[in-house]
Amino acid sequence: MLSEQIVERLNAVVGAQRVLLDSSDFQRFGVDRTTIWEPNPCAVVLPASIEEVQEVVRLANEWNLAIVPSGGRTGLSGGAVAKDGEIVVAMDRLNQVLDFNPLDRTVRLGAGVITANLQDFATEQGLFYPVDFASTGSSQIGGNIATNAGGINVIRYGMTRDWVMGLKVVNGAGDILELNKGLVKNNTGYDFRHLFIGSEGTLGLICEATIQLTRPPVDPNVLILGVNNFPAILDVLQTFSAQIDLNAFEFFSQAALDKVTAQMGHAKPFDTETPFYALLEFEGSTEAVMDKAMTLFEQTVEQGWVMDGVLSQSLSQAESLWKLREDISETLWHWQPYKNDISVRVSRMPDFLREVDELVASRYSDFEVVWYGHIGDGNLHLNILKPENLSSQDFVARCVPVSSEIGQLLAKYEGSVSAEHGVGLLKKDYLHYSRSPLELELMKQVKKAFDPNGILNPGKLFD
Ligand code: MLT
Ligand code: ZN
């Protein structure tokens, strides 16, 4: 419970209507998509400007109160969970497009702009914002930057990091920093912009961003292939990517397809059932590219890797085929999945896949396991589904030891315990499998430089 005096000071900064103290608001603003932790903030505040954010951070320092920055709360690692009496600072009202420059092809906008609105804005200008994932309808650009969101187009366009040209942030000491100011070339020492990208709200609150836009892809085509076994997916990837520029190379298992078609009512891509499916997107701008794609498809069938396939014949069919992949995550919430978001270099994927597959089969033998992910960039999503008869707590307790074994395997393959979902609360105990003790120590020192009193998102990333 906040004292009346503190509430009054917050009211004076953001307006009494924008200081939320009801438990229903705590439930709404105090969690992300994870279901493991109970929200328990002391207040939710909704500032409308960077100056208001700055004032809240200064007050939090004065009273030694922690802050949890909050965007669309679509995160999957507990990075936006406020479980220990923190003030949630929600960016919803910083939702304006502030400036567009057609020559630079950049847009400056508030951190609370919904990702899909940025994508629509780009389309209206005849341009394209390429970072795309299932939760673009509610995720906010500030949250995307704080977690360096990836998604389905990374193989061609990279992560959120690659599109951020400038940031305005408030650090933990309550100072405003303007980072990189939209410059393409700027070799003037440490690039703090990149420190803030992926820092999960532990260094500062991202209030404004300048985002690069690009030209839209021409005539995107989607090809879904039914693949015979896990390693063959990589053979298919190598065959296609050697000859065609791919926008995406995704995969999912038969179990994922069964669930997404049953739950969402989507049609199956074809009748043949195969253990795995690969989804490829490429620009079909010329007939030569389309002929090449068909030839490669035939080759993969001749090799025995692929059993069947379907190529989109229209933009709307391409969009329908994408739903088979994009709706998997939403579908699986029904089973309260325990999520692993892991990566290794693509060249190490065949050996890693064999070992992780063996590990999962032996350690999760009584659980249902659903595989999917962005295999073109080495990123696997391994979801363990909770059996109905097991409580959430017992289920998580059973999954946790296996995560350590997966972590050990990742350390052996020099992989990542969190490829794109971030560390938050969920993965911090496994961070040491991917980062050295010295790196972890340096991270803590960096945090101290930007957040001297440790008030920003404490307990996230590391303790
Ligand atoms: C996805 O690739 O669908 C997202 O990362 C979400 C998820 O893994 O659940
Ligand atoms: Zn993903």
Image (tube, rainbow, N blue to C red):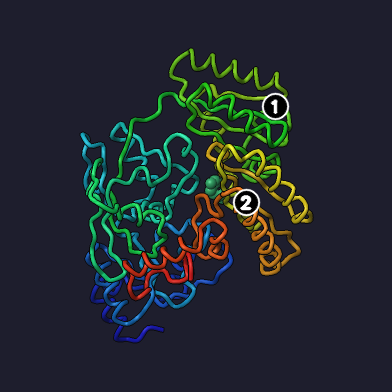
| Three-letter amino acid code at the position of disc 1 | Trp
- Place residue 401 in its image quadrant: bottom right
Q: Position of residue 417 (x, y in %)?
A: 56, 54
Mark 1 residue crowding within 10 angstroms, few (<14) / some (14–19) / many (20+) = many
- Is 345 in front, or is 327? 345
Q: Quadrant of residue 291?
A: top right
Residue 354: image quadrant is top right
Which residue is labeled 2 in the image? 412
The reply to whether residue 335 is in sight is yes
> Around disc 2, counting alpha carbons within 10 Å, would you say few (fewer than 14), some (14 to 19), or many (20 or more)?
few
Q: Secondary structure at mark 1?
A: loop
Q: Taking 65 as reference, is 333 left or right?
A: right
Task: Name the residue located 23 percent from the left edge and 45 percent from the top edge.
Answer: 186
The residue at 55%/63% (across/down) is 426
Locate residue 239 relative to residue 44 in the image: left or right: right
Q: Is residue 337 visible?
A: no
At a point 39% along the width and 56% down the height, the residue shown is 146
User: Mark 2 or 1, which is nearer the eye?
Assistant: 2
- Name the residue: 43% across, 19% down: 285
Q: Amino acid at mark 2?
A: Lys
Look at the picture and state if 179 lies above or below 39: above
Residue 436 vertical placement versus 382 (above, below): below
How far separated are the C-alphas under marks 2 and 1? Answer: 28 Å
Q: Is mark 1 within 8 Å of ligand 1?
A: no
Q: Which residue is mark 1?
A: 305
Q: Position of residue 175 (x, y in %)?
A: 24, 67
